[in-house]
Amino acid sequence: MSRDTKTETADEYQVVVIGGGAAGLSAAVTLGRALRSVLVIDAGEPRNAPAAGVHGFLSRDGIDPRELLDMGREEARGYGVDFIAGVAVAARSTAGAEEGAELSFDVELADGRTVKARRILVTTGLTDVLPDIGGIRERWGRDVLHCPYCHGWEVRNKAIGILGSVPMALHQTMLFRQWSPNITLFLNDVVEPTDAEWEQLAARSISVVEGKVESLAIQDDALRGVVLASGTVIPVEAVVTATRLEARSAVLESLGVPVVEHPMGVGHHVEVNPMGGATAVPGVWAAGNVADLMGQVMASAASGVMAGAAINAHLVAEETRLAVDVARLSSLAR
């Protein structure tokens, strides 16, 4: 495919996208369609890999997460996007110090490779930090869940236990009550409902169990119940837990992009311009869950499209400025 704007060598790209999930692939397609030279560096570790399906994604509801990414990669390749399987560990600016210098970066991979970019988009997502309770990690994404809009339909009308790992558990409890009348809130020595919240729980016929949760009861590869420290087992068919959401921010931090506590206290994220995802560091963008901890797959994909468009516009502005400078010099030389 011919690109009028491509001037880079094999190891130089106009845009390097770090992270090959929904946000990164959507940005890559957008930029590829804009005739940009694009490289996607993907570690192959999508956050939703344990899930059976992606939900709430129009026309693709229930699709296997990896199948969705395979389709996205194929689409991106159709627009000339290149891919590297690897882990980007850091990046640094290589632009000159003089005013008006073109932005440029080196991106370093864990295996020692380095690629050059004029712009960087980080879409590395986040890590779910799970409660330290036996069985949680093994069942995560199967019958241990966190989002009713992602998984509520699949556990509708089942016996659902809400694990009180953070105060937000009360919010989750009320939400999941929409999907099932059989809800049990485990206080887990963490949650202390107010008088008003006790009234709400009673009004919605939600059972409340006191005492610390020890582990999950698993039998025949299925969740059977929640085990309390006392040894009591409370039967449930699904467990809901909040996680600590931590942006995968190593590359961004290496560039000097600040990572801050989310205003809701649920983890750390990167603050970006909502109109396209620009960070505080010129030439560096972020999209998807690394910036929006609460975003579902479709929202992440949309943020990738917007970031791709914003990066292309930024490159166009730079190229126009350089073209004007050249034209002025040419005029003076005549």
Image (cartoon, grey):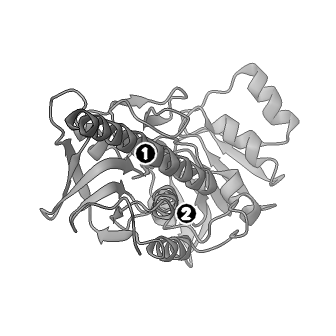
Q: Mark 1 or mark 2, which is nearer the start of the sequence?
A: 2
Question: Looking at the picture, which amino acid does disc 1 mark?
Answer: Val
Q: Amino acid at mark 2?
A: Gly
Residue at the extreme front: 334
On the image, numbered disc 2 is attached to which residue? 141
**Front residue of 45 and 318:** 318
Label 1: which secondary element: helix
Residue name at image x 49 percent, y 59 percent: 34
Vertical arrangement, residue 199 with respect to residue 159, above or below? above
SS at circle 2: loop
**Which quadrant would residue 145 be assigned to in this image?**
bottom right
Residue 235 in sight from this viewpoint? no
Furthest residue to the left?
112
Q: Nearer the viewer, residue 12 or 171?
A: 12
Above or below, 25 against 64 in this view is above
- Neighbor class of circle 1 (other Cα within 10 Å; few <14, some 14-19, many 20+) is few
Give the left or right position of residue 218, taking residue 196 as reference.
left
Left or right relative to 31: residue 233: right
Q: Determine the residue positioned at 82% across, 27% down.
A: 199
**Depth-wise, is mark 2 or mark 1 nearer the camera?**
1
**Left or right side of 303 for 109:** left
Residue displayed at 75% across by 20% down: 195
**Does any portion of residue 252 appear in the rendered image?**
yes
Any mark on residue 316, and which? 1
The quadrant the N terminus occupies is bottom left
Q: Position of residue 305 (x, y in %)?
A: 55, 53
- Give left or right: position of 293 versus 178: left
Around disc 2, counting alpha carbons within 10 Å, would you say few (fewer than 14), some (14 to 19), or many (20 or more)? some
